[in-house]
Amino acid sequence: MDLFNLWSLFILLSAVGFCNGQSVLPAGPLEGVQGKDVTFETIIIPTDVGNFITVSWNFNGGTGLVPVVTSAPNGETVGAGYAGRVTLNSSTGELKLGSLTAKDGGDYAVTMVTNAAVQRTGATLLRVLEPVSAVTITSNLNEAVEFNSTVVLTCSAKGSFLMYKWLNGTAPLVTDGKHVTLSANSTVLTVAGVFRKDLVGPIYCTAFNNLESGNSAPFNLTVTYGPENITMTVTPTAEVKKKGSNITLTCSAQSSPAAVLQWIHNGVPLNVMGPKLVLDNVAVAQSGNYSCMASNAKTLRYLESTTAKFTVVEAISGTKITGPNGTLVAGNSTATLSCQATAGTADTRVWLKNGVALSPSNRVVVSADKSLVTIKPVQKEDSGEYQCKLTNAVSTDSASLKIVISFGPETVSVKGVSAVKVTEPVILKCAAASLPAATYTWKFNGTLIGVMTAEYVIDAAVDKNSGIYTCEASNAVTGLSTSVSHKLSVKEEGTLDDGLTGGQIAGIVIGVLIAIVILIAGVRYMRRKKPPLVSSLQLPYGHGRGKCREPGILRNTTQPSRTAC
């Protein structure tokens, strides 16, 4: 369909009186920004969507009606000057116009005809706005004096239909009508008797219209004030300092420009300027009172800090415990421990034993100044590590000394079987509590047999191994010996009973006692005649061994071996 036929259709529809109905465009005006896009939205009923035969947009900028774009069954026609700038949705009639210029401002009208020959129309006004730009704040002063200066800030910008607002940081700037005021159009901000906090937001001016906005660069104005709120700190903070340590004092004050700081010791100004005073390898003579003085050359004000006082103390060092040098024997010896330091003075002394506080007793006595500990007499439980801790306000030093108490032997015992069959092995183990470790000797039926180890071993028992085995434990340091006896019974195969009655046990005990009496009498008799210590006839066959083998039955003979340990 050509344009002539299209216009003929519009005239025909008008002649037959089809209803126009309600406007399909929202109430205007519609606004757009130069260089950006604008969309003309339509208001249509759902049944009309996608059912338009023709959609036609026209523009009137004051010089007459100009076609923008028309959609018809035979295609889409774009008006002169709109190629590449318009996008038409033929289903809804919506028009998107891009790259706006100032000349695009004016009246726009749309006419749409449905396939039911119903005509929809609408018109609106488009205002094209100049972009917001060049938002700038200017000040009447480069530097202000707190409480004295009045600051006037002016905001200017480029753009259309502009309005203005001020920000202090990110929050709206608050006016009070007296100290802080704004002009009628909000372009001039006045601060009378300026405070330092008034213009440190920083201050921004925002110029805006209905479509966009622009912010100025942040504005800051230096306001001279101070000094005030002066503070001083000492690191470390303790009132007592260690001799030879490093101490740092810092001073600060609120001031613009920055205050000049000078240090004072015991009321005398030091030749030290600046926010920090460092005392390296501090000496006792540097104890006393310290403060700093702040001054401002602009305001001509002076302010002194509070005073910090500290004392320098020498640290404790060279702590040592002296004690007994000789051997300590439980029940006989006395131990005296002395704790002293080569440098520094101790405020407190603490004695520990094996990491636990030492408890005084009738044997353990601590001197009044806690420099001496006396243990009389020592006992085996006094063995351990003794520690002395010396402490003052700046240090703790300690020393330790290990004490060993010789004792025993005690609680001697023999573990092993009491009854075995012929050819079975026998191991008897002797043990005793002793420091230093005990040495052992064994006797069989009262006679020394040359075994001097804790274990007594018989590889293959014979009947003559039956008897009383005595283990004697000795301590060469304490000079003490203790013994214990063990009875062994060796029987032929099949003769071992599962158990003994009470009468049998009583008979055995009586027999053993009689045998011991006879044995002691025999030994005394033999000693008078000075016989050899052990003869081959006195040792039973197959006697035990420690780390070496005792005499036993030699192969192919009934005579015992005479090999000794």
Image: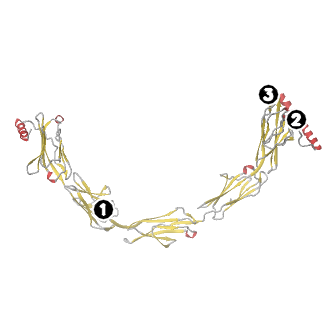
Q: Which quadrant is home to the N terminus?
A: top left
Question: In the rendered image of this protein, does residue 397 appear above or below residue 565?
Answer: below
Which residue is most to the right? 529
Circle 1 Cα neighbour tier, 10 Å, few/some/many (<14 / 14–19 / ≥20): some
Query: SS of the residue at dot 2?
Result: loop
| Residue receiving disc 1 | 219
Which badge, 2 or 3, comes first in the chain's sequence? 3
The residue sitting at 66% across, 61% down in the picture is: 319
Disc 3 residue type (three-letter): Gly
Horizontally, is 249 left or right of 88 in the view? right
How far apart are the two marked residues, 2 and 1, measured between alpha carbons? 122 Å
The residue sitting at 27% across, 59% down in the picture is: 216
| Residue receiving disc 2 | 559
How far apart are the two marked residues, 2 and 3, measured between alpha carbons? 34 Å
Q: Position of residue 369 (x, y in %)?
A: 68, 60
**Which numbered mark, 2 or 1, is in the foreground of this view?**
2
Locate residue 565: give its quadrant: top right
Which residue is most to the front? 556
147, 61: nearer the viewer? 61
Query: SS of the residue at dot 1?
Result: loop
Horizontally, is 241 left or right of 418 in the view? left
Which badge, 2 or 1, comes first in the chain's sequence? 1
Locate residue 69: give its quadrant: top left
| Residue receiving disc 3 | 499
Disc 2 residue type (three-letter): Gln
Is mark 1 in CB contact (under 8 Å) with mark 3? no
